[in-house]
Image (cartoon, rainbow, N blue to C red):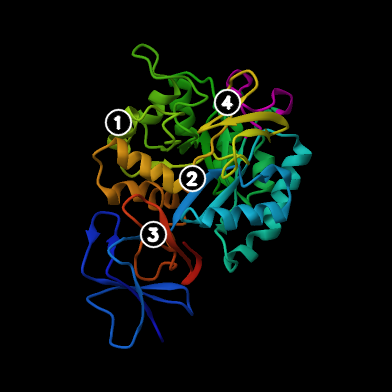
Amino acid sequence: MALTYITNGKIILPDKIVCGKALAFDEASGKICGIVDEAPLGACVIDAKGNYVAPGLVDIHIHGYLGEDTSDAKPEGIRKMAYGVAENGVTAFLPTTMTVSQKEIDAALDAVRSLKEESKTWGGAEILGVHAEGPFINPSKKGAQKEENIQKPSAKFLIDNQDIIRIVTLAPEMDEGHEAIKEAAEKTDILISMGHTGAHFEEAVSAVKDGVRHTTHLFNAMTALAHRDPGVVGAALATDVSVELICDTFHIHPGVFSIIAKQKPDKLCLITDCTRAGGMPDGEYDLGGQPIFLKGIECRLADGTIAGSVLKLNGAIRNVLAHTSLPVYEVFKMASLNPACAIRVDDRLGSLEEGKDADIIITDESINIIRTIKKGKTVYEA
């Protein structure tokens, strides 16, 4: 077994940074073989040149990138997204649908389904499944989603598509008696997330008891935290659910980053919520059949409603590091191990542990991606 060794790097583990060692992996099996004192003489070596050596990033909420969108249901577009986000250090992701028509949702699920196996060995980020953001949301908190496509929560839809859906975002108050939540929680492994919801605190806490385990883009499109009405935000912080944050400094004030990190150290997942405008110049694009307008880091509908982001996941790490005093390893964990744990793929992804997939990135101090390695093979090099 001929191993490759990454030397001269700051190796980022979930709880510390290791220096003066080498990370060994086997390209043939695509697995990490462990951390050793040094590479043997004559071994194949990648010199990290003093940079960070971190686990590949996992984006569990991304609609589009480079002009493409999951809901277009175009396999070539989803493939383009996968190759594009690998340049941002993402080695695994959930292409994310939104509240479009049922026909469009079904087509998008089929498109992702058709690529899932191929993505395990291609030169981009691996597809882990789909995040279905809607269509089971509250019209009062629809955000940039079309009201005409909103549906009542359906356990049957989730059960029928449990082979491809990994997360569903729904509004618990739209599910009478939480019947769909209970049935889906009992019969599937889908992560049920509350989002685009007008629920009160008590309803949200009740939904958590009934099977909700996650919160979609915390603070955005949900009832806020107030001292006499804690809302969905309060319920998310008071229970054991995992939470997403869009840390682009626009969706969320940077002052909130460290507050949530302290409250949810192992449950905070950095996401992008990126649209097709990601990686593209300012201008007009499309989201769920509605025109959106990109200016700088802001994506909005014509009426000013915030409509997703153009954030890159390595950029989210950079932003959190810039606006908090959190340790580097903890922030990387928010974009790797925490999301992997949320969707239960942490047995093989999310950290640089022996036996896990050799999904590895090398970044500089500013979190610019120097190299992305997927299952032992370099898929991007700056």
State how far apart marks 4 and 2 are (Cα).
38 Å
Which residue is rendered at x = 50% and y = 48% of the image?
Answer: 59
Q: In which quarter of the image is residue 209?
A: top left
- Disc 1: which residue: 259
Q: Which of marks 4 and 3 is nearer the N terminus?
A: 3
**Which amino acid type is shown beneath numbered disc 1?**
Ile
**Of labels 4 and 3, the one closer to you:** 3
Contact check, label 4 and label 3, Cβ < 8 Å: no
Provide the secondary structure element on which disc 2 rests: loop
Which residue is rendered at x = 59% and y = 26% of the image?
Answer: 300
Residue 144 belongs to the span the image colors magenta: yes
Q: Is residue 267 visible?
A: no
State how far apart marks 3 and 1 are (Cα).
24 Å
**Which amino acid type is shown beneath numbered disc 3?**
Pro
Q: How crowded is mark 2: few (under 14 residues within 10 Å), some or many (20 or more)?
A: many
Observer-nearest residue: 194 or 300? 300
Q: How many numbered discs, if any?
A: 4
| Relative vertical location of residue 313 with respect to residue 114 in this rendering, above or below | above
- Disc 2: which residue: 312
Q: Residues within 10 Å of mark 1 (few under 14, many from 20)?
A: few
Q: Which mark is residue 177?
A: 4
State how far apart marks 4 and 3 are (Cα).
41 Å
Q: Give the range drawn in magenta.
A: 134-149
State how far apart marks 4 and 1 are (Cα).
33 Å
Contact check, label 1 and label 2, Cβ < 8 Å: no
- Disc 3: which residue: 55
